[in-house]
Amino acid sequence: MPRPKVHDDALRARLLDRAGEILSTTGPDGLSLRALAADVRTSTTAVYSLFGGKPGLLRAVYDEAFRRFGERLSTAGTSDDPAEDLVRLGLRYRDSALADPQFYRVMFSGASGVEPGEESRRASARTFSPALDIARRGVETGVFGNDSPEQIALASWGIAHGLVALELRGDLPVDVPVAQVYERSLRALVDGWRR
């Protein structure tokens, strides 16, 4: 009979979640493997077994952040209306950031201390590609003007990113209905690209 797996996927997920929280508030210098292990009621042996040490853990948190982000974006779906699809993708962008703000900060603030390698760059590009695909489809079908799909996708990505970053930092006025403003901003931007 095989030995039971001591360091399983559930423990790995708990370590990644907690490490993401720590990284997003204190950066890599504030992440102690001993404190992390104690926080999730395991040993540093588990951290080394699962990640090989702190550099492997930092890389895994960074990769997990992009994996979750990409997974949520993939649920936006597509329809016959690329303009609506681009808005829906932007809404998923915000949903993902609010669901895992620690991972959002790890991805976009440099909180992980990880120098993105080739695989990380590909993971980042994969999260942008749905916006680009939708923009291309919008130009090809005549929903959008003859503008560059790259410009349309980048503008949409930028408005989503900027408003989400402000929201997560708490830099928006408290009396503004953020969700409404966010969606209206996306719609106004997308409508501006229409033919």
Image (spheres, rainbow, N blue to C red):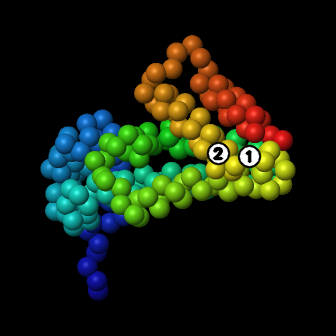
Q: Name the image quarter holding residue 178.
A: top right
Q: In the figure, 27 relative to 55: above or below?
A: above
**Residue type marked 2:** Gln
Q: Position of residue 162 (x, y in %)?
A: 53, 33
Q: In the figure, 151 relative to 192: above or below?
A: below
Q: Residue at x 26, y 68 (%)?
A: 6
Q: Residue at x 67, y 29 (%)?
A: 185
Q: Residue at x 64, y 45 (%)?
A: 151
Label at residue 147: 1
Would you say the residues marked 2 and 1 are in contact, meaning their CB atoms lie under 8 Å apart? yes
Asked if residue 38 can be seen in this view, the reply is no
Q: Name the image quarter holding residue 152.
A: top right
Image quarter of the N terminus: bottom left
Asked if residue 143 can be seen in this view, the reply is yes
Q: Residue at x 53, y 44 (%)?
A: 96
**In screen coordinates, is 106 left or right of 186?**
left
**Closest to the observer, 56 or 45:** 56
Image quarter of the C terminus: top right
Q: Name the residue that disc number 2 marks.
A: 151
Helix, strand or loop at label 1? It is loop
Q: For the residue carrying disc 2, how many other residues have a C-alpha within 10 Å: few (<14), some (14-19), or many (20+)? A: few
**Residue type marked 1:** Asp
